[in-house]
Amino acid sequence: MQTLVMKFGGASMATPKHFLLIAKLILEQKRKNQRIVAVVSAMGDTTERLIALAKHVHPNPPKRELDMLVTVGERISMALLAMALAKEGDEAVSYTGSQSGIITTSNHTEARILDVRPHRLLSSLNEGKIVIVAGFQGVSENKEITTLGRGGSDTSAVALGIALSACRVEFYKDVPGIFDEDPKKNPQAKQYPSLSYSQALRLMKQGSNVLHARCIQLAEKYQLPLIVKSFSEEHRGKGETRIS
């Protein structure tokens, strides 16, 4: 039985209505793959607002406490998505990064993943539940809550995909794939139906911000296929980009 990891960024869950749309996308895939792990970011600009809030209190807040604060964003997303799936009649269970077994270095605000021990996730998957994981966060070997820096949620998704022997990781964005230019600025931008890991990495280093370079490098190391597609009904059927 295959496991599919689905990663949803902040734009895909900007409003409460978005969670119902995402729930339907997950259930569509569950009917095909049966074992689903959804990795979520914070809603919209929640992380930026939390950082701004912290700086109103302290212009240079302690990094440990900043990590404690900003990880709230993903916890909100994971709980709301589990509720949306329950509304659709399916059972889902949400886990923080630490509950998911994502073990990191102790560098607050810029930790790196050392290991993934997904025991609780496997138990829930074996019970037929949809698993939802808060991206961007983990726990250090000293049991401290940590965050993974920019692109951390994408890296969380790939690391979990590797640990769970997933068939692929699907990233749901506000664009239907990777383009040679920003399609929001240039409607004539060319979409890439497929890219090698090295080609995708080069595009990210040239300024494309669709995926973080770290997650592509990790996927290449373990030969885990990545798919970039859109969560928007407007872009349905307009293709996707496969990285392998």
Image: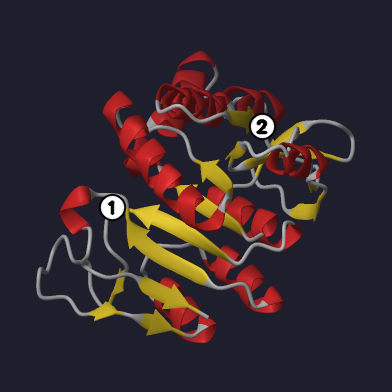
Secondary structure found at label 1 = loop
Count of marks overlaid on the render: 2
Q: How far apart are marks 1 and 2 (CA)?
A: 25 Å
For marks 1 and 2 on the same chain, the one whose residue lies earlier in the sequence: 2
The quadrant holding residue 239 is bottom left
User: Vertically, is 145 above or below 190?
Assistant: above
Classify residue 157 as left or right of residue 18: right
Q: Which of 41 and 65 is in front in this view?
A: 41
User: Vertically, is 165 above or below 87?
Assistant: below
x, y (%) of residue 25? 37, 46
Q: Nearer the viewer, residue 22 or 71?
A: 22
Report the residue marked by disc 2.
96
Residue displayed at 22% across by 64% down: 237
Can I make out residue 150 in this image? Answer: no
The quadrant holding residue 15 is top left
The amino acid pointed to by label 1 is Asp
Q: Which mark is residue 174?
A: 1
